[in-house]
Image (cartoon, coloured by chain):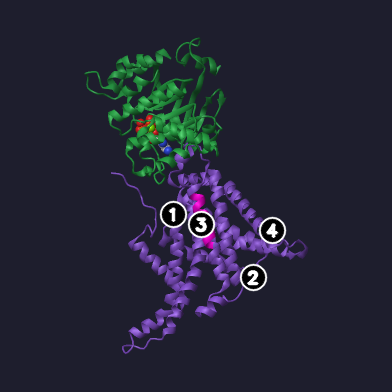
Chain colours: A green, B purple
Amino acid sequence: MQKTAQAKQSPGTAAETPPSILSVNNIEVIYDHVILVLKGVSLEVPRGGIVALLGANGAGKSTTLKAISNLLGAERGVVTKGSIEYENTPVHASSPDELVKSGCIQVMEGRHCFEHLTVDENLLTGAHTRGNARASIKRDLELVYSYFPRLKDRRNSLAGYISGGEQQMTAIGRALMSRPKMILLDEPSMGLAPQLVEEIFEIVKQLNTDQGVSVLLAEQNTNMALRYAQYGYVLENGRVVMDGDAKTLRENEDIKEFYLGISGGDKKSFREFKHYKRRKRWLA
Amino acid sequence: MLFVLETVISGALAGIMYSLVALGFVLIFKASGVFNFSQGVMALFAALTLVGLLSGTIPFTNTDNPALALPVWAAIPLTIFVMFIVAVLIEKFILRHLVNQEHIILFMAMVGLTYVFEGVGDMMWGSDVKVLDLGLPQGAWDWLFDTHDLYVEKIEMVAAATAAVLVTVLAVFFQKTRIGRALRAVADDHQAALSVGISLRNIWIIVWSAAGIVALAAGVMWGAKSGVQFSLSLIALKALPVLILGGFTSIPGAIVGGLIIGIGEKLVEVFSGELIAAAFAGLIEIDPGVFSATENWFAYVLALFFLMFRPQGLFGEKIIERV
Ligand SMILES: Nc1ncnc2c1ncn2[C@@H]1O[C@H](COP(=O)(O)OP(=O)(O)OP(=O)(O)O)[C@@H](O)[C@H]1O
Ligand SMILES: [Mg+2]
């Protein structure tokens, strides 16, 4: 019965949507036994799609991604309700390494490169779960450098000493080395110049088309994210308050006002928009 | 002059023991941020296990059955295997449950582990002083004595060589292998390591096993010289100042720190009394014998100076700060 309720929420109609690679059903997440952060989040990522997860600071984007990749445990967080299915199998009990092995990997917010390892070594750690398949790992290393040519020049530098943009590229490249089917990409635009953000998004788009990698993209940079994603969810306070095609979201007045800063009116908190929530409740 | 050289050599050889124990600390601290208080007792436990296997002791009965005594070539690998099992148990019963807890909680767990180790070691192998006979060469190295008039014990040379081999193997393992790279990744950022699919549990088992092997080496060397007994576990206390000198996360630091402390304390012990007595000659009468126990606390004074002036130690990992 959960299933039918879910089907309504999934992007597009059942007939034209390819089966989801990832489906998150009504999950609740609690940190430190008491802090309830996600209060029933559901979302779907179609195979080969790019889906944006939008929301302001503290909305729960990173928490959602970590719940999927099972990195929550390391932060004393637990999923207390709901279910997560990756490739139609529940992954609630899978360890992060099992998930990486089955093709689902997270690129964490803030890049998290291994600072005392070289760029080369950073990339190679991404292939850790692939064991000692030397030849194919080497081929993939070159493939990553072909996507990020500017990393190749820095391949022997310690990752702690390269620029923020290069670190973001290293983090994405490192994830690619695991041969993922699904990347959970957390705020790749953070702290980067607009031009660099564009460069990185272009590469993600390219990976998506070339390699068929599905992407769940958490972003505060709504404008940019909705240019590359096909579908988007808006999180607020641990709940999905809106979802729709990227195009629809881009044209949505509330989104324009609060995330794109296009509307002329003075900025208020998204939360103050009671009418918005009322409408949402009515739609649900 | 020759006497100074002899003092330096014997200090360096003692220092290598400290280095080996400190190395065990560093391995575990790097990979898990856990301060393994029990490293010294681990050395004792490993040495006890080896002696037990060599003499055919039946665990928990305190009786020997010579028919079960193993030869050295079998007893050493089996002891290493026991240390591996110990690592698995520690991961399973302690680390796994205390991950992400406050440092003080982990520290208390390690203090507890120390006593458990000590107690279990006693129960399994008995608490009497044991002689460890690996057939290592005894006595002075004649050639050095005949040609250079230097007195150096053979067993100490063996200890030095073993330590050198161990350290080289570890360094190559860390720098050149896939697992070694994963270990360094975990040391840098364990969350990121998790995110790329490195299993922290496996890494912990590996470092605790490596620390167990290093502890075995230290325990054997020390035990072969002075017998296997409780006092062996106290070398861990000398490893603390070594860590402060060398830096908690640095393998070369552990080695160099051990050597500095080993050599330093021997020199201070042997010569400080006379030097100070000579300096004050004519002013006050000082008995050089008063300074004969400086060996016991010199290391801590040195460590204190380091804490004040260079808290990250000689080789403490550079903290990369970007601007
Ligand atoms: N380890 C933690 N323990 C307790 N609370 C946490 C923890 N991590 C996050 N939170 C809380 O959960 C809420 C959601 O955080 P989350 O990091 O998921 O937000 P986000 O949408 O990713 O925000 P940002 O855009 O700033 O990255 C915040 O209120 C935050 O304070
Ligand atoms: Mg976040």
Mark 3 near ligand 1 (CB under 8 Å)? no
Same chain? Circles 4 and 1 = yes
For label 2, the residue is B129
Question: Residue B192 at x, y = what percent?
Answer: 44, 39
Magenta part of the protein: which range?
B163-174
Which tag, 3 or 4, sits closer to the chain's start?
4
Q: CA distance from mark 3 to mark 4?
A: 24 Å
Q: CA distance from mark 2 to mark 4?
A: 23 Å
Eyeballing the image, is B138 above or below A36? below
Q: Is residue A7 visible?
A: yes
Between marks 2 and 4 in the image, the one whose residue lies nearer the viewer: 4
For label 1, the residue is B249
Q: Amino acid at mark 4?
A: Ala
Q: Which mark is residue B74?
A: 4
The subunit carrying tag 4 is B
For label 3, the residue is B168
Question: Residue A120 at x, y = what percent?
Answer: 42, 40
Which tag, 4 or 1, sits closer to the chain's start?
4
Q: Amino acid at mark 1?
A: Thr
Look at the numbered disc 2 and give the secondary structure of its residue. Answer: loop
Label 1 crowding class (10 Å Cα cut-off): few <14, some 14-19, many 20+?
Answer: many
Q: Quadrant of residue B76?
A: bottom right
Label 3 crowding class (10 Å Cα cut-off): few <14, some 14-19, many 20+?
Answer: few
Q: How many marks?
A: 4
Q: Is residue A267 left or right of residue A245?
A: left
Q: CA distance from mark 2 to mark 3?
A: 32 Å
Q: If the picture is divided into quarters, which one holds ligand 1?
A: top left
Q: Is residue B42 visible?
A: no
